[in-house]
Image (cartoon, rainbow, N blue to C red):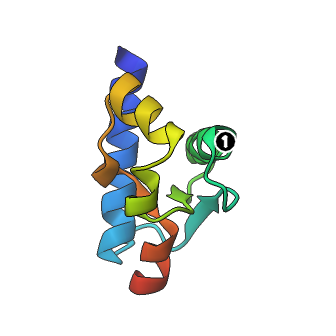
Amino acid sequence: NTYNAIFKKYLKTTTAIARSGQLGAQSTMNVIIGNTSCDMDSCTSTLALSWLYSQRETQLFVPGLIATEPVLEQIEITAHLVEDCQFELNDFYFADELAETY
């Protein structure tokens, strides 16, 4: 589906920029983070809000999932994102990466 492909590209691009620490033309990076439960509604809200802001603003908005990758592999949102939506876990930016990079 076209929207899925567009969103995958957005995730890959923003995650790559955030991980590199090189903001380039973007002088500000905004990380949208959900709550610590990292449940379905928190993750989808984080993804949707960062996407919405990225479409309306000129700043960089990155969805940051609060769970670490090993924890995310064990919860229900993973089945939806990986199996149903065909995303890869590596396409997501995790909140613990924020502290490591910045």
Q: Is residue 28 above or below residue 82?
A: below
Residue plotted at (38% across, 61% down): 70
Amino acid bearing label 1: Ser
Q: Residue furthest top?
A: 1
Q: Position of residue 71 (x, y in %)?
A: 45, 59
Q: Is residue 16 above or below residue 89?
A: below
Residue plotted at (34% across, 64% down): 17
Q: Position of residue 36 (x, y in %)?
A: 66, 62
Q: Is residue 100 above or below residue 74?
A: below
Mark 1 closeness class: few <14, some 14–19, many ≥20 residues within 10 Å: some
The residue nearer to you, when weighing 72 against 94, is: 72
- When asked about the image quadrant of residue 21, the answer is bottom left
The residue at which mark 1 appears reads as 45
Q: Is residue 102 visible?
A: no
Q: Is residue 52 visible?
A: yes
The residue nearer to you, when weighing 78 against 102, is: 78
